[in-house]
Image (cartoon, helix red, strand yellow):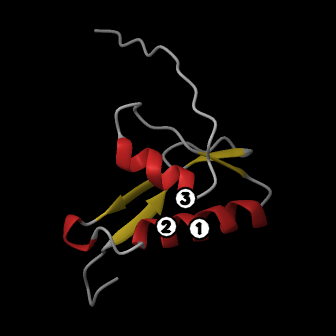
Amino acid sequence: MDRENIVAECVSIFHSGKTAEIDIITNPNYRGQGLGTIVGQEFIKQCLDKNVLPAWDCDINNESSKVLANKLGFFNEENYALYVLK
């Protein structure tokens, strides 16, 4: 937080009870300050304290997400198909 402004947050939009997918967003005005790393580290700590496995998933072209994933200890890249029903 910067006063009343949320500058970075980490949430999980998928939580199975055993696994929690990590989703991080940093306000564009505050990027490059390591805030994504800080909120990600705390999220991972909270997961491990609760015996929940943190998981990372992003689009293969999202380079900034992949860099942050590596900083947080995620390295195994996996390709898979995504199907959308219309």
Secondary structure category for the residue under label 2: helix
Q: In which quarter of the image is residue 83?
A: top left
| Percent of width and height locating residue 68 | 47, 55
Instruction: Identify the residue at image location x=42%, y=72%.
Output: 34
Asked whether the beta carbons under mark 2 and mark 1 sit within 8 Å of each other, the answer is yes
Residue 7: mark in rendering:
none
Q: Which callout, 3 or 2, points at the residue further toward the start of the chain?
A: 2
Tell me the kind of residue under disc 2. Answer: Thr
Q: In this view, does 14 lie to the left or right of 65?
A: right
Q: In which quarter of the image is the N terminus?
A: bottom left
Secondary structure category for the residue under label 3: helix
Label 2 – label 1 distance at C-alpha: 6 Å
Badge 2 is on which residue? 37
Q: In this view, does 65 lie to the left or right of 52?
A: left
Label 3 – label 1 distance at C-alpha: 9 Å
Asked whether the beta carbons under mark 3 and mark 2 sit within 8 Å of each other, the answer is yes
Is the residue 39 above or below the residue 83 in the image?
A: below
| Percent of width and height locating residue 23 | 46, 51
Residue 71: mark in rendering:
3
Q: In this view, does 35 lie to the left or right of 51?
A: left
Residue neighbourhood size for the residue with mark 1, other residues' Cα within 10 Å, grouped as few (<14), some (14–19), many (≥20): some
- In the image, 62 versus 86, the foreground residue is 62
Residue neighbourhood size for the residue with mark 2, other residues' Cα within 10 Å, grouped as few (<14), some (14–19), many (≥20): some
Residue neighbourhood size for the residue with mark 3, other residues' Cα within 10 Å, grouped as few (<14), some (14–19), many (≥20): some
Q: Quadrant of residue 84?
A: top left
| Percent of width and height locating residue 59 | 40, 32
Instruction: Identify the residue at image location x=29%, y=68%.
Output: 31
Tell me the kind of residue under disc 1. Answer: Gln
Q: Quadrant of the C terminus?
A: top left
Residue 41: mark in rendering:
1
Q: Which residue lies furthest to the left in this view?
A: 29
